[in-house]
Image (cartoon, rainbow, N blue to C red):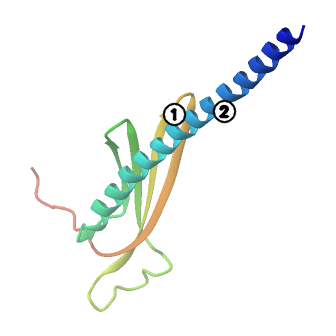
Amino acid sequence: MEIMVSVLVLAVALTVIMQLMAGGLRSEKLSEDYLAAVVCGRSTMEALMLEKALAAGSMRGVCAGGYRWQAVIAQDPALAKEPTRSGLLPFQIDLEVLWQSGTSNRSFHLTSLQLAQVKQEDSRAQ
């Protein structure tokens, strides 16, 4: 009888330990996903902020690993009443990175302000 009770206690203890390990592995995978998404978002935001001229609108793209991003660029209405002395206008860049994690859709947002010239549309027909 004592052996059966000790085997039962051991089985319960092992079950709890296995569940804790599985939860840790899920957390590790989620952390890796968020890190890769942050790298994707940061590199995309830096590329957008390096542009000397911006145009209001939206853009979409894909990063390695199945991470999708979408950016909305708009002139900041509170600050865009008139250009600065250098002719630059403030643009607000809203970037969202999206990815699928198991059955869940995950995302996070980055927002920044950038001073840039207004991108002129190319009037030549091609």
From the image, which quarter does the N terminus lie in? top right
- At which x and y percent is residue 70? 41, 49
Residue at the limit of the structure toward the front, as seen here: 2
Quadrant for residue 88, please give it: bottom left
61 to 76, vertically: above or below:
above
Q: Is residue 108 above or below residue 24?
A: below
Q: Amino acid at mark 2?
A: Leu
Q: Secondary structure at mark 1?
A: strand
Q: Image check: 50 left or right of 101?
A: left
Q: Which residue is mark 2?
A: 20
Q: Which mark is residue 52?
A: none
**Spatial separation of the CA atoms under disc 2 and disc 1:** 20 Å
Q: Which of the 4 image quadrants contains residue 16? A: top right
Query: What residue is pinned by disc 1?
Result: 101
Residue 111, given in percent of the width and then of the height, sits at: 47, 64
Task: Please state which of residues 39 and 25 is positioned toward the viewer in this rendering.
Answer: 25
- Could you tell me residue 5's position as x and y percent? 86, 14
Q: Residue at x 83, y 10 (%)?
A: 3
In this view, the residue in front, 59 or 27, is 27
Q: Residue 83 vs residue 24: left or right?
A: left
Task: Determine the residue located farthest toward the bottom in the rendered image.
Answer: 85
Identify whether 99 is placed above or below 47.
above
Tell me the residue at 11%/53% (across/down): 125
Q: Could you tell me which residue is drawn at 65 percent across and 25 percent down?
A: 18
Q: Position of residue 28 (x, y in %)?
A: 52, 40
Residues 118 and 39: in front is: 39
